[in-house]
Image (cartoon, rainbow, N blue to C red):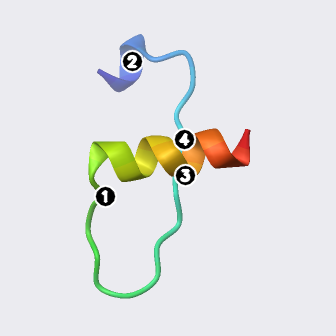
Amino acid sequence: MLDLSDEIVIIPMRGKKESLNVSVAAGIVMYAV
């Protein structure tokens, strides 16, 4: 999948979280734009 992507976005996280819910990640990206 990464080879097919135009861009790869990394959201830095503090603590022991390994992943974010898709809706939370989308909200963070939209807020940053």
Q: Residues within 10 Å of mark 4 (few under 14, many from 20)?
A: few
- The residue tagged 4 is 9
- The residue tagged 2 is 3
Up-down relation of residue 32 to residue 14 (above or below)? above
Look at the numbered discs 3 and 4 and tell me whether their residues touch, using CB distance below 8 Å. Answer: no
Q: Of circles 4 and 2, which is in front?
A: 4
Left or right of 18, for residue 26 = right
Left or right of 33, for residue 22 = left
Q: Quick one: SS at disc 1?
A: loop
Pick the front one: 1 or 24: 24
Question: How many dots with numbers?
Answer: 4
Q: Which of the two discs, 3 and 2, labels the residue nearer the N terminus?
A: 2
Which image quarter is the C terminus in? top right
- The residue tagged 3 is 28
- The residue tagged 1 is 20
Q: Which of the two discs, 4 and 1, labels the residue nearer the N terminus?
A: 4
Measured in 3D between alpha carbons, the distance from the residue under mark 1 to the one under mark 2, in whole angstroms, is: 22 Å
Q: Residue at x 39, y 11 (%)?
A: 4
Say which quarter of the image contains residue 15. bottom left
Which image quarter is the N terminus in? top left
Measured in 3D between alpha carbons, the distance from the residue under mark 4 to the one under mark 2, in whole angstroms, is: 13 Å
Provide residue 16's location: percent of width, then percent of height: 29, 85
Measured in 3D between alpha carbons, the distance from the residue under mark 3 to the one under mark 4, in whole angstroms, is: 11 Å
Amino acid bearing label 4: Val
Q: Residue at x 39, y 52 (%)?
A: 24
Left or right of 27, for residue 22 = left
